[in-house]
Amino acid sequence: MSEDLARRLRQIRETGGRSLRDLERSLHVSSSSLSRYLTGQAVPPWSVVVGLCQVAGVDPRPLRPLWEAGKRGPRVGPAVTVTRNDLPYDITTFTGRQEELAAMLTAARADRVVAIDGMGGVGKTTLAVHAAHRVTSDYPDAQLYLDLHGFTPCRDPVEPAEALRILLAALGVPSGRIPEAVEERAALWRSELAMRRAVVVLDNVAGQAQVRPLLPGAGSSIVLITSRRRLVGLGDAHAVSLDVLGPREAADLFGAALGDARAQDSPALEEVLRRCGHLPLVLGVAAARMRHRPAWTLETLAEYLREGDLGTSGVLSMSLRDLDDGQHRMFRLLGLAPGVDLSVHAAAALAEVPVSTARRLLDDLVAASLVLENVPGRYHQHDLLRELARGAAEERDEKRGALTRLLDHYVRTAATATNLLYPSGAHLRPAVPAGEPFARPADALRWLDGERANLVTAGTYAAEQGWPEHAVLLARILYPYLDGHAHHAESLPLYGRALQAARHLGDRGGEVHLLNEWMSMNARQGRYDPAHDDAKHARDLAREIGDRYGEARALNALGDMRWRERDDLRAEERFRAALELFREVDAGTDVAIVLGNLGLVAGRQGRYDEAEGALRQALAGFEAIGLPGGQGTIRANLGQICLWRGRPAEALEHYRQALEHHRGLDYPSGEADALNGMGTAARHLGEMTQAVEDHRAALAMAVEAGDPARQAAAHEGLARAHRERGERDLAREHAAGALDVYVRMGLPEADDMRAFLAG
């Protein structure tokens, strides 16, 4: 076991101030066992880790990687902790700002929030990123960077709720655990930071309302904020206002960027600095222009600067005049692209040039300091340069053609990647020309993960700005990936806009599928009422236009909702109708899903042989397709049938296999489901201590996944196991917890819990 985990557990015990005897009574774990856990002699069950944290009032989730390293070393690899580092490159020639940097670092450790303000191009981001790199060793748990686009041309600022989702995901919080309300997300963010030592850079902030929910609470993490506005309403935040560089600092920065001695002792240096406004961004651009011209003197550069307008825009425009036609065109078109950044392949599509040409042009622009490459192979522009580029492109009427090419690239490459990852349903998705090829499924998944933010942004932009066909295609093509990897919260805006785009186009087939996908994403997050209405609308519209696959998807969803309501007759009717249609259109994955649903319905009706037959067919289908998540779900369903048949030992084996499948996928909801089943099987076998252990582990996993239904099932299992052990107070406590969730979700299991509490 890692000594780090034992050390953290001892710290948590000290925080709670409880003796071993007190903890023994609270956690129902012997004091001798607790002593072994706290000294590193044994690995505690995850439920014990959660219990210790709950007693102390701290969040257990940051301990999960440490616990897994001790419990199942191969599952998480050799690393003991998982560190996220999103910081852009640190500039190796960072010059000046030494007083501001020293003041920032001192204030960050004392006040924990530093807000840097100043005009565009004054070097706020560079200073914040440099400072963050300087303190990385002191804040090793995470180094996060997020551009909030407060002043990015043609892009809305990032809303606080979305910013919190991105930050929580960066810390490894599963999307299912991220609440919907911004206040709850902010509370979870503060909780996540409380036990970490992290440095967070929040760049390009529009105003204090945008950033206030993102500030830390307790703990030692620090946040560095940049904005063009002075954020006077952030309480104890330490303010640092940047002015343009002084003469000596401006000269030092220009000389470092130039990289040679031509700036030394030149009478023209003062004029060059003045015409560049002493702004770091503009000084860097001017130095880059001179750097590749060894024949130039500073007097030559000053002469060129005199020809342009005095001021920032004049200096930047002068630098553009030095570009050749290809470089200037690439610079202009980059300013049009929605999204965070561009890959080389995307830039090639945008400019309609070969990839090798795009790479050369981008390298030229990086060398001229007109484009940034903060991450290898990904390019973006400073806001001032982006505004200049966009305006130049719009003057030449280049926008429509360039963005159509970029959106075509995203649609085609996304289709290629998705079809490689999910081949069984490829014939049911929109057919588009092939895009960028991938050698292996892992490469396709890596591309989708890397481009996800750009794809979602591009699809939403397309729906709003006049490319509705591309919005519909992107949403439909990406659904298997976004749903299968639980990117529901971040994708909802795309599906809402794409659904509107399909209706605007009169694309009734697209509307059917987007209704199904919109419905599914809402249901995954527990919003069943709107999901039910959308499923019925999708069914009716699909029937009207003769879309058999769309109708089948809607029927399966409606059957699942009837199943939740314990209306088995109607659930089975809808599942059987969906099964017939799925078979008709050769939807192999969907056939296996519905067979699994029918197996559960038959089992709850006591038709056990029929249930096992359906589930065995489903399992064979998922094995043939190669979907371990589906196999895990069916194994859990088989475990449930065995419990209904009075075969708890067989059930336990099925649940154990389900657990292994889900653990291989790092799927906490599936793990919670399997652990709850194992706990129920143990209770039927008379092993109450093991039942409590399994349900506690399930509860911890369900909390981690943000899965209220499985949390309720874990509470119910604990209630029943504690009552069997004669621990009536604990039984009532957990029954009340289950009842609360069942009532909020509108599930009929609430009646069972009311009866349990009355008994």
Image (spheres, rainbow, N blue to C red):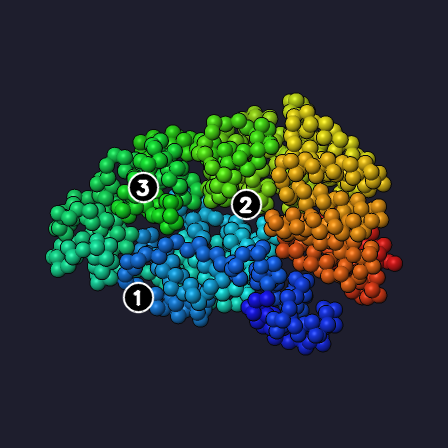
Give 339 or 87, whichever is nearer the viewer.
Answer: 87
Q: Amino acid at mark 3?
A: Leu
**Which structural element holds mark 1?**
helix
Name the residue at 71% across, 51% down.
656
Quadrant for the N terminus, please.
bottom right
**Viewer-nearest residue: 276 or 335:** 335
Q: Residue 65: give its label.
A: none
Residue 758 locus on image (x, y percent): 86, 58
Nearer the observer: mark 3 or 1; the answer is: 3
Whole-percent x, y for residue 24 in the image:
72, 72
User: Residue 98's mark?
Assistant: 1
Q: Nearer the viewer, mark 3 or mark 2?
A: 3
| Distance (Cα) linking label 3 and label 2 | 30 Å
The label number, if any, that marks residue 490 in the structure image: 2
Which residue is pictured at 34% across the width and 32% down the height? 353
Q: Check disc 2 and report its element: helix, strand or loop.
A: helix
Which amino acid lies under the numbered mark 2 shown in the image of this protein?
A: Glu
Q: Secondary structure at mark 3?
A: helix
**What's the residue at 27%, 35% (across, down)?**
326
Rendered residue at 23%/36% (across/down)? 324
Front-lying residue, 633 or 669: 633
**Quadrant location of the C terminus in the rendered image:** bottom right
Q: Which residue is mark 3?
A: 362
x and y, in percent, of residue 461 in the image: 47, 37
